[in-house]
Image: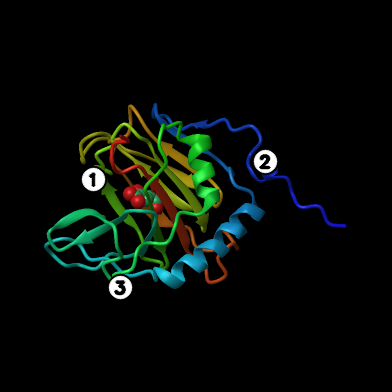
Amino acid sequence: MTLSKPEEESRNSVARPVDTGFAGVDLYPGYLDDVAQRALMGELSAAFETAPPYRPHMPRTGKPWSIHQTNMGKLGWVSRPDGYGYAEANEVNGAPWPAIPAALLALWDELAAYRAPPECCLVNIYDTAKSRMGLHRDEDEAALDAPVLSLSLGDACVFRVGGFARGDKSKSFRLASGDALVIGAPSRLRYHGVDRVIAGSSRLIPEGGRINLTLRRVTKPG
Ligand SMILES: O=C(O)CCC(=O)C(=O)O
């Protein structure tokens, strides 16, 4: 008889963050093990059926991003010609976004320490050698007291964290598959971004590349 792995074994049993050098930026290396990562990839494939990834365009300039995106949850983060914001429906096909998988809601409960669940899971897909994300702040949420929690899947990346102004000194560290990263007070509004993806560093995604899942609480809990 094959016994299934107890749920808690798929998480790093001593959930202690490593020091990133920034108070409130907590990195949990290998928080989800291989089995849990593969299960999540299965859930993502199903979500992509109803919310196919699309290439966003920059507001105003219309320049295409170097990544693909989609969303899960009640609200999806979108880039529109007049700016960034949240949408209840997928503006590409008009459908509601698929639900956030239970495993990610559990991750939020374990690591975010916030009184309400996330409303958005932004899916960033780094699928070419040129895929990156410039330094930016997550500032479109009313619930700025909630942390942002992200999970990395697939190839590792060089992740950069800066200060509270774009030109401030910054420092980078690696995010690998299964790593969870919490960006909360007092660093919630720090600039951050992805310099590059390290091709061939993971076998989780057969065609290569990196997927990042960013969980955010958008509205203030009532
Ligand atoms: O892909 C990442 O690790 C960064 C994601 C991010 O900064 C964002 O979605 O705002």
The N terminus is located in which quarter? bottom right
From the image, tell me which residue sits under label 1: 140
Residue type at tag 1: Asp
Q: Which residue, as the protein is rendered here, is positioned at the far front?
A: 222
- Residue 154 percent across, percent down from the top left: 53, 59
- Residue 201 percent across, percent down from the top left: 56, 58
Q: Which residue, as the protein is rendered here, is positioned at the far right?
A: 1
From the image, tell me which residue sits under label 3: 93
From the image, tell me which residue sits under label 2: 8
Q: Earlier in the sequence, mark 3 or mark 1?
A: 3
Crowd band around label 2 with a 10 angstrom C-alpha radius: few (<14), some (14–19), many (20+): few
Q: Label 1's element?
A: loop
Q: Label 3's element?
A: loop
Q: CA distance from mark 3 to mark 1?
A: 23 Å
Q: Earlier in the sequence, mark 2 or mark 3?
A: 2
Where is 143 relative to 3, above or below? above
Task: Return the residue nearer the eye: 162 or 43.
Answer: 43
Seen at 51% across and 54% down, the residue is 101
Residue 201 seen in the figure = no
Instruction: Indicate the quadrant where residue 141 lies.
Output: top left
Task: Return the residue nearer the eye: 122 or 101.
Answer: 101
Residue type at tag 3: Asn
Q: CA distance from mark 1 to mark 2?
A: 33 Å
The C terminus is located in which quarter? top left
Seen at 74% across and 49% down, the residue is 5
Seen at 48% across and 48% down, the residue is 151
Where is 87 relative to 190, above or below? below
Residue type at tag 2: Glu
Where is 53 relative to 88, above or below? below
Task: Return the residue nearer the eye: 157 or 183.
Answer: 183
Crowd band around label 1 with a 10 angstrom C-alpha radius: few (<14), some (14–19), many (20+): few
- Residue 17 percent across, percent down from the top left: 53, 32
